[in-house]
Amino acid sequence: MRETADIETSSDGYAARFAGPVGGWMLGVQERIVRRLLERLPAGPILDVGGGHGQLALPLAAGGREVTVLGSDASCARRLAPGIAAGTVRFVAGDVLALPFPDRSFDVVLCFRLLPHCDGWERLVAELCRVARAAVIVDYPTDESLNRVAPALFGAKKRLEGNTRTFTLFRHREVARAFATAGWRVAERAPQFFLPMVLHRALRCRPCSAALEAACGAFGLTRRWGSPVIALATPGGVDAAPPSAPGVA
């Protein structure tokens, strides 16, 4: 069976989770980390697998990057319409576990909001590595964080967000192992937040959230126990570097 988890993350309902100042702040944290990682990489074509949410494809394309988005269904292109109409984003519908591209077709491959909802996530990682030349950048929630209590809070999270789904929590070593199996290494990990994202949504106060996360970062809590994690993988090797500290102001 084909993986279609990105249909939900490409929907208007999912985008509503990031509406308003707090949502914009959270997406800003994610985008700044990704841009920082991209600065060290070749400036060639980017593939964003499952990126119909447009969180990265649209701003990166607006900044001049050549971006292709792979979605599991034609409906995943809807939120990308402005970029597609402007000719800055290309959309391809296909199987996320059998990407319709030759080996090493893209300098960088991104995959955000998909691993924790994908049953065949290890196969997905292998496909990301197959079509990438220089780097793969993914995000994932980890249970090596306050997410460890997520199952107990799922009911409250669902009441707040409405359309939330269950998701897989990863350990860093299992993600690193999946990349190592493909012949790649996790070269850097950048945790985004120490406090759960649902708490920031409940607070509805961007300055409060930014201040809380800045304090957590200053005390090293985000570096050690932050989630979701943005991981940069590169060809060769098996050892992961320690987490880097993100900016969350």
Image: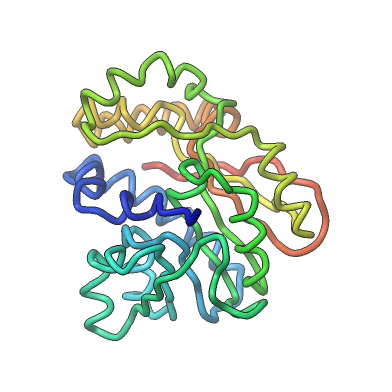
* Residue 77 point in image, percent of width and height: 29, 68
Corner quadrant of residue 232: bottom right
User: Does residue 234 appear left or right of residue 230 in this picture?
Assistant: right
User: Does residue 142 appear left or right of residue 135 in this picture?
Assistant: left
The residue positioned 47% from the left and 40% from the top of the image is: 192
Residue closest to the eye, 228 or 39: 228
* Residue 14 point in image, percent of width and height: 26, 46
> Is 138 located above or below residue 105 in the figure?
above
* Residue 50 point in image, percent of width and height: 42, 59
Tell me, what colour scheme is on the image? rainbow
Residue closest to the eye, 226 or 101: 101
Residue closest to the eye, 212 or 51: 51
Q: Residue furthest right?
A: 237
Q: Residue furthest front?
A: 1
The residue positioned 29% from the left and 45% from the top of the image is: 25
Q: Residue furthest bottom?
A: 87
Q: Quadrant of the C terminus?
A: top left
Corner quadrant of residue 106: bottom right
The residue positioned 36% from the left and 17% from the top of the image is: 153
* Residue 95 point in image, percent of width and height: 49, 65
User: Does residue 153 appear left or right of residue 116 in this picture?
Assistant: left
User: Does residue 138 appear left or right of residue 150 in this picture?
Assistant: right
Corner quadrant of residue 71: bottom left
The residue positioned 24% from the left and 41% from the top of the image is: 17
> Is 94 located above or below residue 8 in the figure?
below
